[in-house]
Image (cartoon, helix red, strand yellow):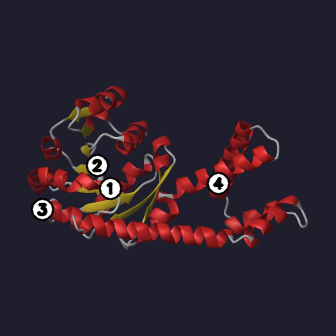
Amino acid sequence: MASQVTFIGAGNMASAIIGGMIDSGYPRDAITATSPSEEMLTPVRERYGIRTSTDNAAAVAAADVVVLAVKPQIMQDVCAGLRDAAQARKPLILSVAAGLSADTLEAWLGGELAVVRCMPNTPSLVGAGAAGLYANPRVSEAQRGLATELLEAVGLVEWVEDEALLEAVTAVSGSAPAYFFLMFEAMEEAGARLGLPADTARRLAMQTAFGASRMAMGSDKTPGELKRNVMSPGGTTERAIAHMEDAGLRRIVAEAMDACAERAREMAEELGKR
């Protein structure tokens, strides 16, 4: 029998995970989503055929897994309403909220609970996500496996054993879709300057990124080796790469990711003081 999974929150990320679970064969009658707004629940219920409720505590009372998918700023109030049901049921808590530590979530829910934190990213909305997961010591191997199953429904899953590394995950994948969107913007603008229609340059850039990613993920070669395979001595690619290197692209990327991770740490501290 499938574990009963309750989503607290029915927004984009919850909807993406629910859709991925169903596409992977997870039974619809084992999934419940909650929201204080029937307006939010109606499209989720109609699209996926799952149970919905405006009563968080009642939904948690029947859950084996509770996915916390609400904004970090309201999480403490939401957890206060779930505390009694969570303590009675002792479900696995899976949080996709950024910045809130496992200890903070566990304390808000009354303590003695298995908590998994997940840092997903927006490509999860199209089944191509990348997520970093961290489990507190109360999480069993079976629960780790279940968390992996749920998140693999929308993409790649990687576990980290140090919760602080989720800040690095934020820099590498959580925020990173925007890095690539910026690159697409820059390539589109450059292509237009070179005479291409902007929409043609955009499509070529995005398809090339898609193809390069598929090649890299399907190869046993490192990105550096794959890069060198495209570069002919004295050729066009070599000149472009040399210009990027001379302009400090590696330094820019490293400093940007450092800034991202630092902001993740700051946000965690700010939210923990609420």
> Which amino acid type corresponds to the residue marked 2 in the rendered image?
Val
In the image, residue 164 sits, relative to residue 5, either above or below, namely below
Residue 183's disc is: 4
Instruction: Tell me the CA gap for discs 3 and 1.
Output: 18 Å
For discs 4 and 3, the disc positioned in front in the rendered view: 4
Q: Is residue 230 left or right of residue 76?
A: right
For discs 2 and 3, the disc positioned in front in the rendered view: 2
Q: Which of marks 1 and 2 is nearer the N terminus?
A: 2
For discs 3 and 1, the disc positioned in front in the rendered view: 1
Residue beneath disc 3 = 110
How many residues crowd mark 2 within 10 Å: few (<14), some (14–19), many (20+)? many
For discs 2 and 4, the disc positioned in front in the rendered view: 4
Quarter location, residue 161: bottom left
Circles 4 and 3 in contact, beta carbons < 8 Å: no
Instruction: Tell me the CA gap for discs 2 and 4.
Output: 30 Å
> Which amino acid type corresponds to the residue marked 1 in the rendered image?
Ala
Give 31 or 176, whichever is nearer the viewer: 176
Residue lying at 69% horizontally and 72% vertically, measured from the top left: 248
Instruction: Kindly state the secondary structure of the residue where label 3 is placed.
Output: loop
For discs 1 and 4, the disc positioned in front in the rendered view: 4
Q: Earlier in the sequence, mark 4 or mark 3?
A: 3
Give 192 or 175, whichever is nearer the viewer: 192
How many residues crowd mark 1 within 10 Å: few (<14), some (14–19), many (20+)? some
